[in-house]
Image (tube, rainbow, N blue to C red):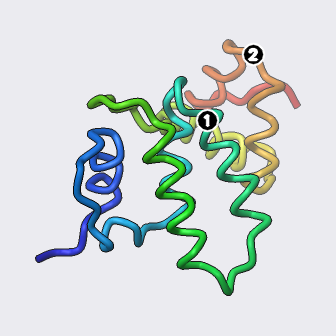
Amino acid sequence: MKKPTLFDVINHINEKSDTRDDDLVSFDQFMMNRAYSMRLDTIMFANEMNVLTSLSNSSNKDFVDDMVYDFYYSMVPKGRVFAKWAKSSKDESVLINAIMNKYKVNRQMAVSYTQLIDDNESALLIRGEGGKQ
């Protein structure tokens, strides 16, 4: 039997299957928390798990994995609900690269610049016509 993927674990929790497979408990907590942070009805659960698991000791990883799995299993409402994963748009990536090239800044600084420029200036930067100096 193949090892369950993250989506298999999420489906198992969402559908509230009666059987508990120990393979389902082994998963990446970060990705599990990220998956449940994408849904409006489970975002607070993901936040709590982020706080609680960041405080835990790494030597108790198996215990913490069980705790996270049991928490989500008991708290997430039953149903086949899927949320779209948040992704940056292609235009945003192009804009960030244009800002990096124009102003000779690193990626982190370019991302912060995107919050300071308006749509017209963004369009100019993407077309390569510059922007304000």
Residue type at tag 1: Leu
Assess disc 1: are there few (<14), some (14-19) or many (≥20) residues with their C-alpha within 10 Å of its C-alpha: many
Residue under the image location 58 percent in, 30 percent down: 126
Q: Quadrant of the C terminus?
A: top right
The circle on residue 132 is none
Residue 29 coordinates in the image, percent (x, y):
54, 62
Residue 119 coordinates in the image, percent (x, y):
67, 14
- Horizontal side, residue 44 vs residue 28: left or right: right
| On screen, residue 132 above or below 97 | above
The Cα atoms of the two marked residues, 2 and 1, are separated by 12 Å
Q: Which residue is mark 2?
A: 118
Q: Quadrant of the N terminus?
A: bottom left
Tag 1 secondary structure: helix
Residue 98 coordinates in the image, percent (x, y):
64, 41
| On screen, residue 36 above or below 41 | below
- The quarter holding residue 23 reads bottom left
- Horizontal side, residue 63 vs residue 131: left or right: left
Q: Residue furthest left?
A: 1
Assess disc 2: are there few (<14), some (14-19) or many (≥20) residues with their C-alpha within 10 Å of its C-alpha: few
Q: Residue furthest front?
A: 18
Residue type at tag 2: Asp
Residue 67 coordinates in the image, percent (x, y):
56, 62
Q: Residue furthest top?
A: 120
Task: Looking at the picture, tell me which residue is in the foreground, 74 or 28.
Answer: 74
The circle on residue 95 is 1
Residue under the image location 53 percent in, 68 percent down: 65
Tag 2 secondary structure: loop
Q: Residue furthest right?
A: 133
Circle nearer the N terminus (2, 1) = 1
Task: Looking at the picture, tell me which residue is in the foreground, 50 or 65.
Answer: 65
